[in-house]
Image: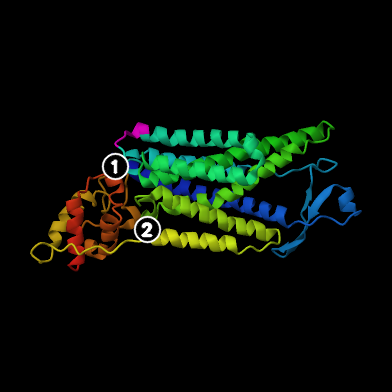
Amino acid sequence: MEALLLNYGVEWLNLLVRWLHLITGIAWIGASFYFVWLDNSIKPPKPGSELEKAGVSGELWAVHGGGFYNPQKYLVAPKQLPEELHWFKWEAYSTWLSGFAMLFIVYYFNAPAMMIDKSVADISSAQAIGIGLGTLVTGWIVYDLLCKSPLGRHDGLLGIVMYLLIVLTAFVLSKFLGGRAAYIHVGAMIGTIMVGNVLMQIIPGQHKLVDAMKAGRTPDPIYGKRGKQRSVHNNYFTLPVLFIMISNHYAMTYNHANNWLVLAGIMAAGVLIRHFFNLKHKGRIAWGYPAAGVALLLVVAVAIAPRPAAKLSSSDGTPVDIAQVQGVIAQRCAVCHSDKPTQPGFATAPAGVMLHTHALLRQHADRVYRQAVQLKSMPIGNLTNMTDEERALIARWYESGAK
C-alpha cells in the first residue's frame, strides 16, 4: 500500500511539473520567436528624423488586442537609462528548472524502466544517470568554447559544426541508453545550452550595458552583438527541442535501429523550416527551405515505415488461443498495463491502456501488435524480458484474427 501511494504521489508530481514545464516553455519560446521577428521586421528611421537623432536603429507599428504598439530598438542603448526595464530571463530559467525536475521524476527516479535497455547496454542506474548528467555539462562547455573560438565569427560554419556534434551525441547516447532516454537527453543538452546562453552570456551582457550607463560610460556594443548571436542560436534550437519533447509518444522514431539518424533528419528539417520563417521576417521568401524540410521528413517517414512481413501462422494452421497470449501479457505487460500496476514507478497504466482481461486485450489488439511486435518498443527497455518467441506468439494470434 505504501508503494502504491508513493507511485501515486510521484505521478501527481509528474503531472504538475510537466504542466509547469509546458507553460514556462511556451512563454520562453514565444518571447524568442517574437523578438527574432521584431529584430528582422523593424525598419530604420528616416535620415535626419528625431528617432535617428535619439539613437533609434529601427522601429515598427503593430496592432494587437485592440491597441497600437510602436516598439523601437536602440543600436546600443538610449541616451538615458529608463526608470524601469523588463528583463526576459525567468521564462528561460523556469523552463530549464522544471525540465530538469522532469528528468529526475520521470527518468532518474525510475532509471531501470525509463533509461536502461539491456539489449542496448547492460549498465547500472548510476551509470545511466551519470551518462545523462555528463551529457548536459559537456554539451554546454563544448558549445560555449566553440562560440568563443575563431569559429564563433562564422555563424554558418558554427551552425554546421554544432549540428554534427549534436548528431554525434545522439549516436553515442543511442549506444548506452534506451532510445527514449537517448532522445530526451539530446533535448535536455540543447535546452541546457539554450538556458546557458541566457544565464552566462545574454543577461550578464545586458547587465554590463546597464552598469556602463549608470557609471556615465558609453556602453560597449560587443555585449549586444554577443547576446544577439546567442539569441539567434536559441531560435534555431527551438524546433528540434520541441520535437524531442513530444518524441516519447512516437516509438517509431526513438525505437528504430538507427534512431540517432532518424533524429538527425527530423532536427535538420526543423532548422530548415525555422530558417524560412526567419528569412520571411526580413521580407525574403525562400520556399526551397520549407520544401527541403518537408521532403526530409517524408524521406524519414518512408525510411522507418514498417515493412510487410510474412504471416506468422501457427504450425498446424489453427488460431492461437487467447489464453496463451493473455499468459504472456500478464507476465510481461500487465505489470504496468492494468488497473493496479505492480511494477515500481507506475501508479496507473501508461497512456490509460489496460490489458489485464481478455476483453481489454482484444480491444487494444492493434496497439499491442504494433508496440510489442512491429516496433518492439514495449515493454519499455524490455524491462520484463519478453522473448522473441513470445512476440511471435502475439503475432500469430493477431494475424489469425485476434479472436
Mark 2 or 1, nearer chain start: 2
Q: Which mark is residue 307?
A: none
Residues in magenta? 122-127
Residue 361 percent coordinates (x, y): 22, 61
248 lies above or below 123: below
Instruction: Between label 2 and label 1, give the one nearer the viewer.
Output: 2
Judged left or right of residue 84, residue 170 is left
- Residue 385: quadrant of the picture: top left
Q: Residues within 10 Å of mark 2 (few under 14, many from 20)?
A: some
Q: Residue at 54% of width from left, 34% of height from top?
A: 142
Q: Residue at 26% of width from left, 59% of height from top?
A: 368
Q: Is residue 123 magenta?
A: yes
Q: Amino acid at mark 2?
A: Ile
Q: Is residue 91 visible?
A: no
Residue at mark 1: 344
Q: Residue at 66% of width from left, 64% of height from top?
A: 285
What colour scheme was applied to this rendering of the protein? rainbow
Residue at mark 2: 304
What secondary structure is found at the residue carrying circle 1? loop
**Quadrant location of the C terminus?**
bottom left
- CA distance separating discs 2 and 1: 32 Å
What secondary structure is found at the residue carrying circle 2? loop
- Judged from this view, the residue extending furthest toward the left is 316
Residue situated in front as seen by the camera: 13 or 312? 312
Judged left or right of residue 239, residue 230 is right
